[in-house]
Image: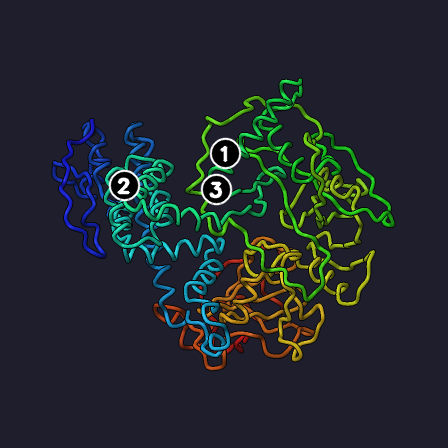
Amino acid sequence: MAPEQRDLTPEPPARGSGAGVRRWVPARPQPTPEQVSARLAEARREAHAVDEMALLPAGPGLAATLADALPRLDRLTAAERTEVVAMADRVAAWAHHAKALAAASTARHPDLLPPREVTAAVPAGAALTPVDLASATLAMRLRTSRREAHTLVREGRAYRGVLAPTGDALARGEICPARARVLVRRLGDQAGEVAWAVQEAVLPHAPGRTAAQVARDVERALLLADPEDAADRHRRAARQRCVSRPRVLQDGMAGSWVVLPAARAVQVDAALDAAARRARAAGDGRTLDQLRADELVGRVLGADVPVVPVAAPVAVPGPDPSDGREATHDRSTTHDGDATHDRTTTHERSADHDRGAARDCSATHDRTTTHERSATHEHGAAPGPDGPIGSPSPDRSGRAHVLVTVPLTTLLGIDYSPGEVAGYGPVDAVQARALALGGTWRRLVTDPLSGAVLDVGRTRYRPPAALDEHVRARDRYCVAPGCLVPAAAADLDHTVRFPEGPTADTNLAPLCRHHHRLKHEGGFGLRQRRAGEFEWTTPTGHRFRTGPGVEHLVVHCAGSIAGPPAGAVAGPVVGPPAGRDTGPAAGPDLRPAGGPPAGPPAGPETGPLAGSRAAHRARPAPPELPPPF
């Protein structure tokens, strides 16, 4: 039985508080966490124990009650277990609010100010901001994307300002982070009076609505609160239209996110639907979902691209290296009713070419909160037939240049080691063989244990491009921790600034445009311990190590990092200017006064091998180690 509730009349809005937001509160006295914990420990409980669990506000007390309830789950009723889940959801909302506030405070710390020498040389408005540096630091430390870290900082700033009512509702556990982010995304850049009006209209009902429903409520309230600016908002939003880079899905699939003006998106959807239904009416055995996906691929890539087998695990012989045909790639299918396709960038560019300018639209659109899928648009409930993925509309032609790394043992059919598609990730042996068919071959001999490139053969030769090709093939991705921008789309950077550092594989690395700027303008240090092994140091003193061919983050903190090995590139590394404080951003100094922190014993290299999992010790660099700047 639900508790009796009453509606409070809203107070005038006050900056920094949750006042002005109409919300439901219980009429009966609110129980304490200790009372609820004691109630759950009783062998015989009254029915209103569930109501008491639902009334507990988020905070440390609720977290303690949740911890007490977990060992007793087997003795709880179904209703009580459901409320335990709801309690955990409120605790997560409260913790997310604290996390966002802490992230925003990081951006205000002096250590995260860009070096003055650098900002003075950058055109006005183009310099990195403290938010940029805080987002990059948090992305490395939390092992998350830069987009996610930036969103977190932006949230915290909003909760301290005009969106304080939303932050308060989140801290109380009344709304989840997904619903709060809907308001942050839509109202974070609005005028204060507009944001207040929309929150007052939306927040009272938000606890009982999904994130998708809240998004519609916000749009409706925004149109009512500021109808004059609606057209301008749409024009500004239309300038952000884009197609994301492929995102890895399971079993060799990929997904892309398309952002278009609503009218165009509806037209595209209708065109794909009509083409798929015509094909079905003509007797095509594929499902509507499969036909929609294949129609999209056909319109983008054209009819002259090879098909990719879906089911038949047959060894495909490699083409003649002198064939000269361009490498192409046609991979498409559906995932939960969503059309997906694969896009990568050409690998044939010079070492000095600007490759980091293209942006991934997913950096500006939070797909986890705005694009909730539903089963109502599921065209093909039954799985479709096996067979090649085709191109039903050959009205356009196009070539997709793709770099595919395939172990020789896979090509020869000796084993089923996975291949690697630049810009996507690992694919199974059958797909790797199929993608290699018809391509222009470059021999990439790799170590079967570490995946590091040992030798490179070439079909076309230009002296700068040869070294460029070797380094990009070795590292595969931007060498920043957790970054999955393909090396083919990144800038090739001298780790030690030229001419102090040589133009050699031991001093070159692919960096996406964002991490390239962080290195040169943001006070982030980078050194190449040996060819293909990198060590980053953030302005807060955290260090991270990445290895050759490693696409997931390999974290290693400064406390147990040995000096550079013999043969490593020596010399200065671009980073913060001399004298810059590189200690922790906030809180007490974590370094012991009497020497370096405890770590592995002295001896051979103690860092993690490429691809291994390493424990992260959250300690800044001890004073004894030379700073890697």
Helix, strand or loop under label 3: loop
Quarter of the image for residue 444 reads bottom right
Label for residue 202?
A: 2
Say whether residue 205 is left or right of residue 599. Answer: left
Question: Is tag 2's residue or tag 1's residue first in the polypeptide sequence?
Answer: 2
Residue at 67% from the left image edge and 71% from the top image edge: 507
Name the residue at the bottom extreme: 579
Label for residue 261?
A: 3
Task: Give the amino acid at mark 1.
Answer: Val
Question: Is tag 1's residue or tag 3's residue first in the polypeptide sequence?
Answer: 3
Query: Cα distance, mark 2 to mark 1?
Result: 27 Å
**Residue 121 visible to an observer of this rendering:** yes
Q: Pointer 1: residues within 10 angstroms few (<14), some, or many (20+)? A: few
Quarter of the image for residue 568 reads bottom right
Question: Is tag 2's residue or tag 3's residue first in the polypeptide sequence?
Answer: 2
Mark 1 — residue? 266
Task: Give the amino acid at mark 2.
Answer: Val
Say whether residue 521 is left or right of residue 501. Answer: left
Q: Is residue 93 above or below residue 516?
A: above
Render colour scheme = rainbow
